[in-house]
Image (cartoon, rainbow, N blue to C red):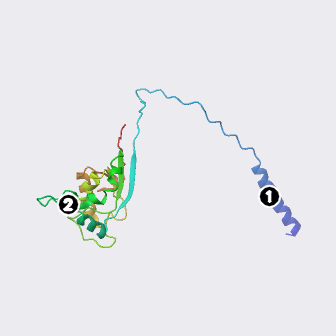
Amino acid sequence: MNRHTHFSTLLFVFLAATACRTEATPEPEPVATEPVVIEPTPDNPIVDASASFAAVGDLLMHANVKRSARESNLKDETGTSTNNDGFNALFEHIAPIVQTVDYAFANLETPVAPTHGKGSKSMVFNVSPSLLPALVHSGFDIVSFANNHSYDQGINGLVETIDRLDASPLEHIGTGKDCAQAAKPLLVDIQG
């Protein structure tokens, strides 16, 4: 192929590609400026509702965090903790905000499995069940336990955590005793 033929081929390809691009693009339909009114029916009622939502990130129960809770533990004259073994204190600065929303979420990045615990160390967590009522006290409604620390205490620790969450007022998502339960969506009605 000589230089002239090569140039002619390239020019033909360029012109063919350009011809494809020059087709007219359809104009978008104008957006209606009038409000759309939907009348309620028995099958399709209109609900005027609103809800507020808050979310916080990982609740990582490192040794220092648990030590802070222990050091903040307040006991009455009988020796019973009055602040969930000090865990309430961990959330005291955010609780006034969390308590004002309709639904609050946190990522529970620790098992709650003292019965089946295999110990904890750096990056392997486990926490006292006192954390769960402290979360409720602080205004949290739901936790996700679907994370890389779910199996820190093995399968028995995971099941114990699910059992403890089931027994608490907290709703939970992301894990289950079988795949169907873990994948099941949670639907909640908040203020309609």
Asked whether 189 or 89 is in front, the reply is 89
Tally the numbered discs: 2
Circle 2: residue type: Leu
| Pair 2/1: label in front | 2
Which of the 4 image quarters holds residue 52? top left
Q: Specify whether 75 is left or right of 146.
A: left
Query: Element type at marker 1?
Result: helix
Q: Can residue 28 be seen by looking at this rendering?
A: yes
Residue 117, horizontal then vertical, whole percent:
23, 67
Q: Is residue 72 above or below residue 94?
A: below
Q: Specify whether 102 is left or right of 11.
A: left
Q: Can residue 186 be seen by looking at this rendering?
A: no
**Which residue does the numbered mark 1 point to in the structure image?**
14
- As drawn, the residue found furthest toward the right would be 4
Quadrant containing the N terminus is bottom right
Quadrant containing the C terminus is top left
Q: In this view, does 50 lie above or below 144?
A: above
Which of the 4 image quarters holds residue 107? bottom left
The residue sitting at 80% across, 58% down in the picture is 14
Q: Specify whether 126 is left or right of 7.
A: left
Which of the 4 image quarters holds residue 155? bottom left
The answer for how far apart the CA atoms under marks 2 and 1 are is 79 Å
Residue 58, horizontal then vertical, whole percent:
37, 61
**Which residue does the numbered mark 2 point to in the structure image?**
74
